[in-house]
Image (spheres, helix red, strand yellow):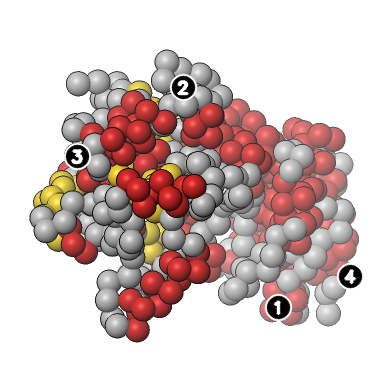
Amino acid sequence: MSVRVRFAPSPTGLLHVGALRTVVFNDLFAKRHQGTLILRIEDTDRTRYNPESEAEFIETLKWVGIEFHEGPHVGGDFGPYRQSERKEAGIYTPFVEELLAKGAAYEAFETPEELEQMREFQRINKMPTGYFGGDWRDATPEQVAAAKAEGKPCVIRLKIPRNTAIVGEDVVRGKLEWDSNTVDDPVIIKADGMPTYHFAAMVDDHLMQITHVFRGEEWISSYPKHIALFDAFGWDKPVFVHCPVIVGNDGKKLSKRHGATRVLDYKYDGFLPDALKNFVALIGWNPGDDREIMAPDELASAFHLEGIQASPGKFDMEKLKWMNGVGIRSLDRDSLISTVSELVKDPEILSYYAGKEPEDPAPKISADEYHRAISTLASALDNDSAFAEQCVVLEQERVQTLADFGPATEFFLVEELSYDEKAVEKWFGEPHVRKLLDDLAGFVSGKSEVSVEECEGFVKGWAAENGFDKIGPVVHPTRVALSGKTSGPGLFDLMSCLGPDRIAKRIARAKELLR
């Protein structure tokens, strides 16, 4: 059996983490089995359909590294791949007529007001809420003809069998069973003639020869309706895989405060596609061992259905950042420079940070600070590329995201440093600092460049000559004078990168702050 899987979003909003996890599972499963990955657009809700959402889905998944073998943007033998187009082509009509002819579906003519009265009655009497037949499940042909003659609008509902058990299999949870008397009759064709998800998705899965359906566990409650539909046609069912819900570290529903956002935002926040895909794949799935960092091919070869868990999968932003940092440190120099340059020069990134809402709790670096620093880095990569690239390489070991290179390198690139007041207060009051800065200025005077080894020799030599057993009292005020802060890349690398001219200018500015 050739594996065929589909990602079938409804383009009514933005692509979020839950949907990304679904398509990642589909993608990995298809790759493991040399199968086919299909994009199908479920756009039957025309009041909420947004063509921009569909375009963003495709753009976002291309960035993540998801490639479809079939879909509205690439074609294929099972098209059209938009359900609205399939409806217009008349694909669903014979299947509706078949269900009506065999008595497995029926037309229902209740008004919205009558349906609301029915639901209110059910609530008051603590009855199961839903449509279990009303006046139309067993209506005579004459009653239906009369309603049509009056011009009453109608929907078509699936007639769920009664007084029996509906049994299905889920890869994650095993055998599932429902009392059919608790399953309401779903609408399969709306009053405007459009098919609903319950109908169109299942018919399309059959016609497109889908072998496995990955979807969220929230669809388990609808599963008996889908089983009933397949049974009504006498079709073989695909394998259903209901993936666990995603929660935050606190066990609560995933939200923005946990770091959940539209998937394309992760691009501008500086995440690598492979790191994001790796992280998302591990939400609710594990390879059966302790592996966490896996290359795309390794992920695909390791992916198996038995590794999907039933318990909620946790979205841990700190873990994502850690994995992304590992990915950044694995890049060679050329890949690092090109990847950082592509991000900070992206025409959309500055507008992204300009429009970014304040976060709660507030991050250490605000969106405004990212905006300023990324703009500075982009300009430097254009106007002084050799120096800017050297700065980026020096910070490679310290950042967690590509966007972090902006704030991390900013102190290298600006003419006027911003000094940490506490650091100045602590170190610039020491009696030896003025002489240290004077001697450092003398060390770089007349030089065009200084090597890492020369810088190390100066600092260690100065400490020894001036009676310091440890070099900390020399390193710390030197770092503050040259960078404005107490942390950063290795001091000797920092000094060599800045070079004599920049060092001299920064010493002159730092001496103005000495007490």
242 relative position to 81: left or right: left
Crowdedness of circle 4 by 10 Å Cα count: few (<14), some, many (20+)? few
Query: Which circle's residue, 1 or 4, is located before the other in the chain?
Result: 1
Quadrant location, the N terminus = top left
Under mark 1, the amino acid is Lys
Which circle marks residue 357 in the picture?
none
Q: Which mark is residue 79?
A: 2
Marks 4 and 2, the one that precedes in the sequence: 2
Q: Tell me where residue 131 appears, x and y as whole percent.
A: 33, 62
Q: Which label was assigned to residue 231?
A: 3
Q: Nearer the viewer, mark 3 or mark 2?
A: 3
Q: Amino acid at mark 2?
A: Gly
Residue visible at 26% across and 54% down? 138
Left or right: residue 29 compared with residue 118: left
> Which of the two discs, 2 and 1, sits closer to the camera?
2
Label 3 to label 2: alpha-carbon separation: 24 Å
Residue 503 in view here: no
Query: Which residue is located at x 34 percent, y 84 percent?
Result: 124
Is residue 124 toward the left or the right of residue 492 in the image? Answer: left
